[in-house]
Amino acid sequence: MQRLLVLVALLAVAEKPAMAHEIYTGVHGKDGQICCGGDDCAATIFRERGDRYEFLSREGHWIFVPVDRITFLPIPGDPPSPDGHRAHLCYRNPGRYDAPESLVGGDGQTIHLYCAFIPPAGM
């Protein structure tokens, strides 16, 4: 019985990240690039500051993303946002050879941005 409980607990922990990340499989950004190569993407929230969009990073920082880098489409399989501020941000920490145009930042953090998604209003 104890082995069964341990096995069930291990399966539950192992399945959650994979299942949650499945919605990003095959998702492409504005320029046709694949957005995610592992655990790069996550659901988040965004806010508008005048004509700027800021996304909350996994580390808890507000990142300014230029509008020309945002894809305004829903992620297939993502539940509707009750407050209209749900978004998705796909990125990794920057490396020393990243091109400056791939980097965005704000609030004390810089990221190498792959993709940013905001579903159209009402989705």
Image (cartoon, helix red, strand yellow):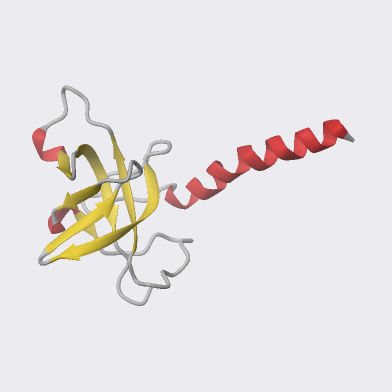
Number of numbered discs visible in the structure rendering = 0
Residue that extends furthest to the right in the rendered view of this protein: 1
Res 87 quadrant in image = bottom left
The outermost residue toward the top is 96
86 relative position to 32: left or right? right
Q: Nearer the viewer, residue 33 or 41?
A: 41
Which residue is at 69% across, 35% downward?
Answer: 10
The residue drawn where x is 84% and y is 36% is: 4
Describe residue 79's horizontal placement relative to residue 40 as left or right: right
Q: Nearer the viewer, residue 70 or 33?
A: 70
Q: Position of residue 115 (x, y in %)?
A: 27, 48
Residue extending farthest bottom: 122
Q: Quadrant of the N terminus?
A: top right
| Horizontal side of residue 92 vs 18, given as left or right | left
Q: Position of residue 38 (x, y in %)?
A: 42, 36
| Relative to 5, residue 71 above or below | below
Q: Position of residue 14 (x, y in %)?
A: 62, 37
Residue at the spot 24% in from the left edge and 63% down from the top edge: 47
x and y percentages locating residue 67 in the rendered image = 14, 59
Quarter of the figure that contains the C terminus = bottom left
